[in-house]
Image (cartoon, rainbow, N blue to C red):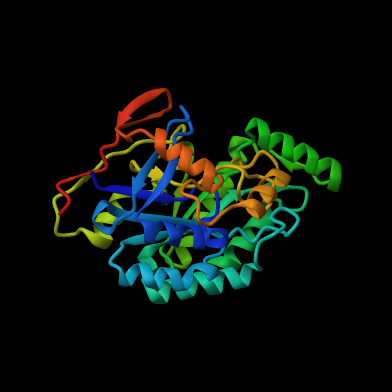
Amino acid sequence: MSKIISISRRTDIPAFYGNWFMNRIKEGYAGHINPFGGQKYTVSLKPEDVICFVFWSKNFEPFMNSLKLLNDMGYKFYFNYTITGLPEIFECNLIPTQKAMDNLKKLSELFSPKHINWRYDPIVISDITDYNFHLENFENMAANLKNYTERCYFSYAIQYGKVQRNFEKFRNNHKINVIEPDLVTKINLANKLAEIAEKYNITMYSCCGDVLINEKIKKAHCIDGDIIKELFYKDNNIKSKILPTRKECGCTASIDIGAYDTCPHGCIYCYANINKEKAYSSYNSHEPESVFLGYSVEESKRFEVSSVSPKSQKQNGNTEQLSFFENVI
């Protein structure tokens, strides 16, 4: 069955693991570990088995040549490009905001504005990034990205247990408080951002925050079967299936081939890393020839022997068949 492949919610493959991914393209498959049950299996990456790649990154520059090659090979893909403009202290290993925006523009010129979801995500409210900071910061970025993207996805930082611990550590180290805004503040700020975005022909989409949806803010589908159909399958009578990854998620069913605790960006709000040190260690010791990202070649070989077929995937406590599209090609 053809699949949508997410690359990746769990780590930044275009920025840090491009060689690993292109090795997987060469071999025609990659490892995947089900985060809910731990089952390990391999997923075909052959062009005929991939409906679409959805690439997530905060820096596509190291991956630009690979994207051109993938396009020439006939792969279909679009981009979730996260650019928040937050102070460096929150995202300590990112490229400068202007450089990231310049890279987004290059992607837009190579492919199209419709290929790009700009992610102003997450919105972090703190002593140094208050309500007014975001209004000014967002307007500067939206003005810069006008005509290069049509969609902006956003959410507020969610203080999961491990994220909350990172915020507490951050506060102790830097004497900066990260604030959980009340609902009224969230709604007001979201509406203001939507008004700003509208001036620059950008539509806002709320990720996992349905209370923010209104006539100017739509529900986000970060992996979106409708976008894929519009870009690549207009002439096909296809249907996509929503398979949420968390509460109020609107994503279409996909397989994610990333790995937790491997991204060295060092963002304090990241839910995919337990701590920065572990992520740095994983990155420095990773083996590009491994089938399973974040594991050694030897471990991957052992996983391959015992891997299972991805007939189903358990999410949110339910087992769902991996039904991605019907009647494709």
Residue at the location (63% across, 42% down)? 273
Foreground residue among 21 and 213:
21
Foreground residue among 126 and 53:
53
Measured along the vertical axis of the image, is residue 103 above or below residue 118? below
Residue at the location (52% across, 56% down)? 13
Measured along the vertical axis of the image, is residue 135 above or below residue 141? above
Q: Can residue 278 be seen in this view?
A: yes
**Picture coordinates of residue 321, whole percent (x, y):** 28, 31
Measured along the vertical axis of the image, is residue 83 above or below residue 300? below
Q: Can residue 144 be seen in this view?
A: no
**Picture coordinates of residue 180, whole percent (x, y):** 68, 37
Residue at the location (46% across, 27% down)? 37
Instruction: Locate the C terminus by quadrant.
Output: bottom left
Task: Answer left or right for 245 relative to 58.
Answer: left
Give the quarter of the image for residue 67.
Answer: bottom left
Instruction: Locate the N terminus by quadrant.
Output: top left
